[in-house]
Image (spheres, grey):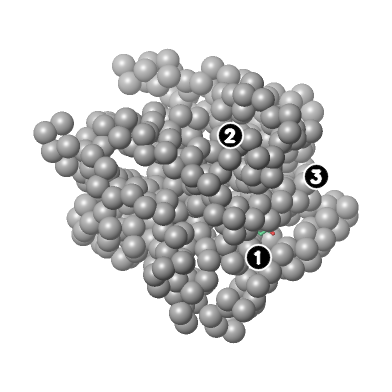
Amino acid sequence: MAETQALLRADKSKNKAFDKMLHQSSSNSQVALCAKSTETQALLPADQVKNMAFDKILHKSSSTSQGGLSAMINKDNEAHKAAVAEYFQHWDDKKAEDETEEVRQSRVADYASLTRQYYNLATDLYEYGWGEAFHFCRFAYGERFGQAVARHEHFLASTIGIKPGMRVLDVGCGVGGPAREIVKFTGAHVTGLNINNYQISRAKQYAVKEKLTHKLDFVQGDFMNLPFPDNSFDAVYVIEATVHAPNLESAYREIFRVLKPGGVFGVYEWFMTDAYNNDDLTHRQIRLDIEEGDGIAQMLKVEDGLAAIQGAGFTLETHYDLAEDYANETSVAPWYWPLGTDLRYAQTLADVFTVLRMNRFGREISHAFISILELLRIAPSGTRKTAQSLGKAADALVEGGKKKLFTPMYLMVGRKPEDY
Ligand SMILES: CC(C)=CCC[C@@H](C)[C@H]1CC[C@H]2C3=C(CC[C@]12C)[C@@]1(C)CC[C@H](O)C[C@@H]1CC3
């Protein structure tokens, strides 16, 4: 029964990258083998099996690599090329001035493969440049980069009241950096969910390495169709992930469904602010560059998010923009500073070196190096294009942050009514 339902729910859309590869790649027989390897896979929807096989071939053994750079060069070239083509078809030659609703809707319709392929391409660069927690944060006086990142996670965990013994869901868990930190900080059990197979396999490995497997599970799945029964979790959190949703209210409604009555949901959401004007071409270009370089089909405004969380059934308990904290509270640097050019915000000497892998200067050097690796065929085809697109997004994030058009940390806390 459950199997039939899973098959009925299967996304019928074709995985173009996989099909292209099947015809081009030297690893065809490997693809076929992977696609029908285990009994478990026979129970999964066909497209999910295909995606798993594709991702396995693309990443080869790089999911066990130590760091981003060595993982980056250990890829199947044909599969990487196919992933780049599938991802960038949505943005190549698309300019802000001639953006139409139709173009945006075609991205939205393809959100699942768009998000999956984005993280197939960007994960190693993220790990190399930023670390294992894929989100922004606020910075306090004298606080190291890593400390600030962890504090952002602690803040959400304590705001939604995560306690030892609770069962918690992390939606869009990346490679599990925040989930590991929240387990250590609270003693709760955390299940991480992610659409990208590669991120899930890395998250599982880090959990083993840090001896946390008794407190952590990682499950591959789409947050638009959560693979959990109703009323499963005491708390759910999202850190900068549901911006990939094709429909935010439906994503939040799934979270509402899996939460127990009285359970709490906390999210740091990416939004364009009230200051954003879509008729202003400069504003629109900033939004488009962020969307392209961050794998986002369509970014919404704060007002849409507030309507979505309440429309999903939550009682909204708290909402405000943590980015505003820089102006009036305890932060000494804006959230976007590590991507910019101003090294004076560094709180420790170590941060100067950390930030050199992320900021404008460091990016220019590392992206030139990556281009050489691709020319020498050490890095797979399309690595340079991906790095350039991430760089463009970084500039747009800084610009959007400076102009207060965009925030990556709009906090919303909602509760599922006790009597639901
Ligand atoms: C995409 C979403 C919803 C969240 C991720 C937020 C951030 C962790 C990333 C947004 C832009 C990313 C860039 C990098 C790391 C991760 C982000 C800050 C790099 C610094 C990684 C190293 C590359 O050489 C340059 C990247 C620029 C963008």
Report how many numbered discs are placed on residues in the image. Answer: 3
Left or right of 332? Residue 118 is right
Residue 232, x across and y down, in percent: 24, 38
Which residue is pictured at 40% across the width and 44% down the height? 171
Which residue is pictured at 17% across the width and 42% down the height? 262
User: Can you tell which quarter of the image residue 367 is in?
Assistant: bottom right
Check disc 1 and report its element: helix, strand or loop.
loop
Q: Is mark 2 within 8 Å of ligand 1?
A: no
Q: Mark 1 belongs to which amino acid?
A: Gly
Q: Mark 2 belongs to which amino acid?
A: Ala
Which residue is pictured at 54% across the width and 31% down the height? 112
Residue 139, x across and y down, in percent: 47, 71
Query: Residue under circle 1?
Result: 340
Real-space Cα separation, disc 1 to disc 2, in angstroms: 25 Å
Real-space Cα separation, disc 2 to disc 3, in angstroms: 24 Å
Query: Residue under circle 3?
Result: 381
- Tell me the mark number nearer the camera, choosing from 1 and 3: 1
Query: Residue under circle 2?
Result: 297
Real-space Cα separation, disc 1 to disc 3, in angstroms: 28 Å
The extreme left residue here reads 419
| The C terminus - image quarter | top left
Q: Mark 3 belongs to which amino acid?
A: Ser
Whether residue 183 appears in this view of the structure is: yes
Residue situated in front as seen by the camera: 341 or 8: 341
| The N terminus - image quarter | top left
Left or right of 41? Residue 5 is left
Check disc 2 and report its element: helix, strand or loop.
loop
Q: Is residue 326 above or below residue 252?
A: below
